[in-house]
Image (cartoon, rainbow, N blue to C red):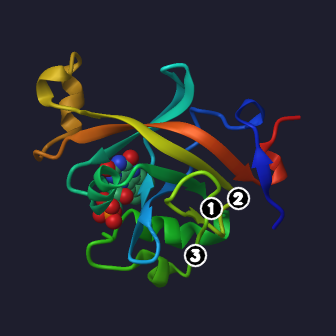
Amino acid sequence: MEKSRIEIEQLNLQPFTAFEPEGILLVSGQDPCCVNFMTIAWGMFGVMWAKPSVMVMVRSTRCTWELLKENPDFTLNWLPEEWRDAVTLGGEESGRFLDKFEATGLHPAKANAVLSPIIEESVLSIECKISCRAELSPEQFVDQSLLKYYTKDEYHDLFFGEILGATGIASFRKG
Ligand SMILES: Cc1cc2nc3c(=O)[nH]c(=O)nc-3n(C[C@H](O)[C@H](O)[C@H](O)COP(=O)(O)O)c2cc1C
């Protein structure tokens, strides 16, 4: 699989479908001892503080949440269809109890600009430096109907990441 660096302006990614159909993998931590991935399906791409950025939402009960608090960065990874089972596992199992790389056969690989690894088997990886973390709490919800997503006391934190680079196959490049 041939992958190359993609400039952010050239990235061919539709923000409303970027996490479909079954989510993508967020990797945080540093190899070899403390690296983990989890499946995410909610997030936003755009410009924050004049930088190309992504915002991901991670509940405080996740192993990943702890890693995001301890580490300066994370990566987002899109897997080809044949890795669908690994993406499913990433959303069902916790890195607290299982080495998900070992369990799935995915491999961490050195990123260009951040310490967290990318995933070797991915078709697109985006490297992000954490710029801001914001905690959600019930009183912040103007639309109270959204509280249906929080039946337990497990609110998301919003992690904003400045996008430092992207590497992917040609179909993720415009033109
Ligand atoms: C399709 C899908 C999307 C998910 N999206 C999110 C998400 O955006 N934020 C979140 O906190 N959990 C999300 N989850 C749940 C986590 O992936 C799941 O709890 C995972 O086991 C956490 O792993 P960790 O404890 O190793 O961090 C999602 C699960 C699935 C199946």
**Of pointers 3 and 2, the one earlier in the residue sequence:** 3
Instruction: Give the labeled residue for mark 2.
Output: 123
Residue reaching furthest to the right: 175
Element type at mark 1: loop
Element type at mark 2: loop
Instruction: Give the labeled residue for mark 1.
Output: 79
Name which residue lies at 52% across and 44% down: 128
Q: Quadrant of the C terminus?
A: top right
Residue 11 lies left or right of residue 115; in this view the side is right
The picture places residue 122, in percent across and down from the top left corner, at 65, 63
Name which residue lies at 50% across and 65% down: 87
Residue 154 lies left or right of residue 124; in this view the side is left
Q: Residues within 10 Å of mark 2 (few under 14, many from 20)?
A: some
Instruction: Give the labeled residue for mark 3.
Output: 107
Determine whether label 3 and label 2 are within 8 Å by CB.
Answer: no
Distance between the Cα atoms at labels 3 and 1? 12 Å
Determine whether label 2 and label 1 are within 8 Å by CB.
Answer: yes
